[in-house]
Amino acid sequence: MSNILVFVEQRDGKVRKAALESLTLGRALAVKTGGTVAAVVAGSGISGLAGELAAYGAAKVFVADAPELALYSCEGYTAALDAAASAFSPSIVLVPGTMMGKDVAPRFAARRGVGLLSDVMTLEVENGRLVGTRPVYSGKARATVAADPAASLQIATPRPNVFQAAKADVPAAGEAVPLALSGLKIRAKVTKIEAAEGGEIDVAEADKIVSGGRGIKGPENWPILKALCHELGAALGASRAAVDAGWIDHSHQVGQTGKVVSPSLYVACGISGAIQHMAGMGSSKVIVAINKDPEAPMFKVATYGIVGDLFQIVPAMTEAAKRMKA
Amino acid sequence: MNHIVCIAYVPDTETKIKIGADGKSIDESDVKWIVSPYDEYALEEAIRAKETKGGTVTVVTFGPAKADVGLRECLARGADDAVRIAADGLAQVDSLGVARLLAAAIKPMSFDALWLGNKGAGTDAQTLVPMLAEMLDLPHINLVTKLEWKDGAVTCWREIEGAKEVVEAPLPALLAAQKGLNEPRYASLKGIMAAKKKTITVKTPADLGVDAASISGEKAAVRWTKLELPPGRQAVKLIPADDPAKAAEELLHLLRDEAKVL
Ligand SMILES: Cc1cc2nc3c(=O)[nH]c(=O)nc-3n(C[C@H](O)[C@H](O)[C@H](O)COP(=O)(O)OP(=O)(O)OC[C@H]3O[C@@H](n4cnc5c(N)ncnc54)[C@H](O)[C@@H]3O)c2cc1C
Ligand SMILES: Nc1ncnc2c1ncn2[C@@H]1O[C@H](COP(=O)(O)O)[C@@H](O)[C@H]1O
């Protein structure tokens, strides 16, 4: 096994951080396999991205640039990945485990008749095969998953925010190779994108999250948490209790039936720590629990905890964060 | 309009997980099983479409005999037929293998919409939807939170990071349900009684022309080589809250200087 192909997610001509994480991971794996790293990117008017990807180690950048690829479609973007894989013949394909990546990678895997290591939090090459680990059963167990060493291709979707993104010491060539996709068949078409309110950071992408649960008492109290979000540069998350009460949109929900996140900091305010909530945030690097009940299960997973009233603690944190910046 | 709904019968999310003797799977004694939560949204949406537009709802699962309980629950809620692909006695089959079995079972059936949950609780893999769509050569829409049926087509609102995509696809299509799509109903007493009389069609992989040995255990495309309990987290460092301002100050300094996350 040697060459590694990385699918690069871009939206509006901007490369997603998760794609740079996958490129960096691809570079680390290439050291072991002795191959080169290439990137593939699909979109419209995106030829200029090759330079940025070269800085992260892409020796070649396959570019599928066409008007019908301007908006994401699984069929269109999978065709781009497939064409790049045919041109480059990689033995490993990495696709960032974002919503787009988790849509594209399995469709591509099925096209090639091979398996997929989904949502891995570690990834290594061992005896010629990809081996990774990932949380399963709502984070109550951890599985080691291994690809079939005999497979023509081994594919993985690394979980966003877990692997570091770092530029290569020496930029790679980044040779742009245009891909012509003939006979493109796009049946499921995006007709419109409805953006969330006022440029908020989405919890799925955030490096820091401040979350509120039933303990915040009502939607009128979100500003207390939002002020802290603002100071920390964090996204606003919520428990299912807060979502089901109608206090906030489901896109903010963290957990089993919400988003699974791995930020470096997760601040849980007035969230008890039910197993289904933990399933979504249990792999966060640092967890802070703020809860007036010392028995709340959140304290069992928390790195730091304050047993107290969130209506006093959270505003005090906002003030402390302001002072720290000053 | 005819619908097919694929359901996974999985350990209840509240269930305590113990590692099995083989060190690769869970110990299934004492486990309570449920229809995977997202699949309930998928089933509910299919039943609602049947109620307004007519047609049938068929539920399909790949699982051992105990999964019949889950299928009966779906029949009780309003599904018309149930098919189980027998997994009894099979070693672990990965998503690619499950997709092959489901594709083989579904291919001869005629339908307008094929429904799945966006994620099967337990393995949490999120891989089956695009795989099955590819194998059946169908368009698919993942993470659907709202939809409108059109003439021979469907418009779905799909959740992505920080936005919603409005996606249109011709039917037949594969649609994957996300939370928010609807509130699943409970089975009525009448439904439960009616479900008892319905038959569940059981097919073996061989009936579907799939060689089970080639997709399970050591032949699976992805193998679980180890299952373990997650590494324990360090005990919590509690900060006294007598003076909220001081507590907050201390916390922020710990986050910056000790945890180095600020
Ligand atoms: C199939 C299934 C899927 C689920 N999926 C999810 C999911 O994706 N995400 C999710 O979050 N849940 C999920 N749940 C629900 C989950 O089981 C819990 O019900 C939910 O997480 C509870 O939310 P909560 O912690 O906000 O509320 P509660 O459990 O009511 O906790 C509120 C907490 O706030 C504290 N509090 C109250 N007032 C204050 C105050 N003034 N200051 C400080 N602390 C205070 C209380 O001590 C308490 O600990 C799911 C459940 C099921 C069955
Ligand atoms: N054994 C199974 N039988 C039938 N459908 C399944 C099975 N496993 C998963 N599914 C379907 O595939 C969806 C996604 O599962 P997964 O890709 O495993 O996360 C589930 O919500 C189900 O609709």
Image (tube, coloured by chain):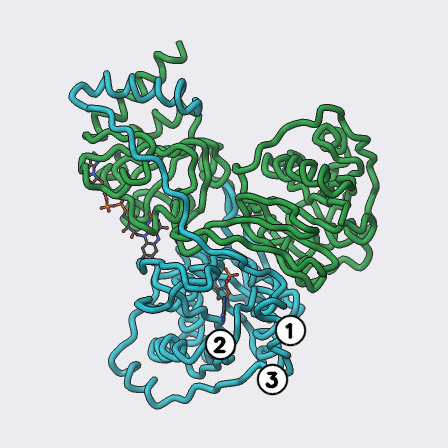
Chain colours: A green, B cyan
* Residue A83 pos. (x, y %): 78, 53
Image quarter of residue A221 = top left
Cα separation, mark 3 vs mark 1, equals 11 Å
Disc 2 marks which residue?
B60
Residue at 24%, 39% in the rendered image: A218
Q: Are marks 1 and 2 on the same chain?
A: yes
Disc 3 marks which residue?
B206
Cα separation, mark 2 vs mark 3, equals 17 Å
Report whether the residue tagged 2 is closer than 8 Å to ligand 2.
Answer: yes
Residue type at mark 3 is Ala
* Residue B92 pos. (x, y %): 53, 68
* Chain name for mark 1: B
Residue type at mark 1 is Ser
Report whether the residue tagged 1 is closer than 8 Å to ligand 2.
Answer: no
Q: Height in image: B252 above or below A298?
A: above
* Residue A61 pos. (x, y %): 78, 39
Cα separation, mark 1 vs mark 2, equals 22 Å
Q: Earlier in the sequence, mark 1 or mark 2?
A: 2
Residue at 28%, 40% in the rendered image: A300
Rendered-image quadrant of the C terminus of chain B: top left
Q: Which mark is residue B214?
A: 1
* Chain name for mark 3: B
Image quarter of residue A7 = top right
SS class of the residue under badge 2?
strand
In the figure, is residue B148 to the left or right of B192? right
In the figure, is residue A309 to the left or right of A35? left
Q: Earlier in the sequence, mark 3 or mark 1?
A: 3
